[in-house]
Image (cartoon, rainbow, N blue to C red):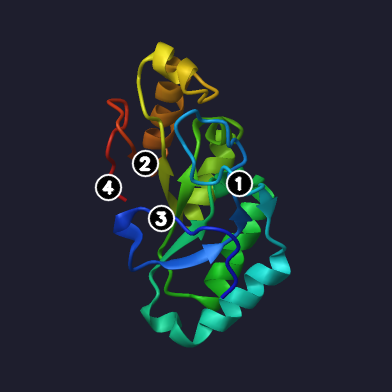
Amino acid sequence: MHFTGPVYCPPFEARSFLLQVTTGCSHNRCAFCTMYRDVPFTVEPLSQIEADLQEAEPWKEGISRVFLESGDPFTLSYERLCRIAELIHRYLPHAQTIAMYASIRNISGKTDAELSALRKLGINELNIGVESGSDAVLRAMHKGYNAREARHELLRLSHLNFLAHCSKNEFCIPKTV
């Protein structure tokens, strides 16, 4: 398996298969976060992603969850996320859930139709570091969006039946997948 830089995932993903599709964080400006401060954002080549999936194929029977690494893979284009999901299902056919870190900014960049199609491909859980519902705090932390935008995007996800795990935010509405 190929990993560049630090590997972070939520504790509840401890038993998930980790698949690196990006390195670093595309935003990397949050005032409080040092997770990827010294790691430039890059996108893994599809050939590397497929090689990692081929390496995992012998264990395909036991892999039902895949967590895409690194900082915010949901910044990838709709087309690239579809291709990655298709590769996952080719090599790991028992994978039911594809989860990853996401941000309000890269959720807002996808249409409802794109989100629905991604959901149908098994991309159905997003881990979102909203941090606060206060515009002043979001501005001070350089999050790149305001509370109204966060609420709007989280409600979109809820209506489309995504499970959104949010850090320290009253807006996150748990949804059963």
Residue 152 in the image: above or below residue 127: above
Callouts 4 and 2 close, C-beta under 8 Å: no
**Which image quarter: residue 74?**
top right
| Mark 4 or mark 2, whichever is nearer to me | 2
Please tell me which of labels 1 and 2 falls first in the chain: 1
Q: Quote the CA–CA distance across marks 1 and 2.
A: 27 Å
Please tell me which of labels 4 and 2 falls first in the chain: 2
Mark 2, Cα crowd under 10 Å, few <14 / some 14-19 / many 20+, is: many
Q: What is the three-letter code of the residue carrying label 4?
A: Thr
- Asked which secondary structure carries label 2, the reply is strand
Q: Quote the CA–CA distance across marks 1 and 3.
A: 18 Å
Residue 109 in the image: above or below residue 76: above
Residue at 62%, 40% in the rendered image: 26
Q: Residue 156: x, y in percent?
A: 44, 30
Q: Quote the CA–CA distance across marks 3 and 2.
A: 15 Å
View extreme (bottom): residue: 58
Q: Is residue 139 left or right of residue 29?
A: left
**Residue on which the image places disc 1:** 38
| Mark 1 or mark 4, whichever is nearer to me | 1
Q: What is the three-letter code of the residue carrying label 1?
A: Asp
**Residue on which the image places disc 3:** 9
**Residue on which the image places disc 4:** 176
| Mark 3 or mark 4, whichever is nearer to me | 3
| Mark 1 or mark 2, whichever is nearer to me | 1
- Asked which secondary structure carries label 1, the reply is loop
Q: Quote the CA–CA distance across marks 1 and 4.
A: 36 Å
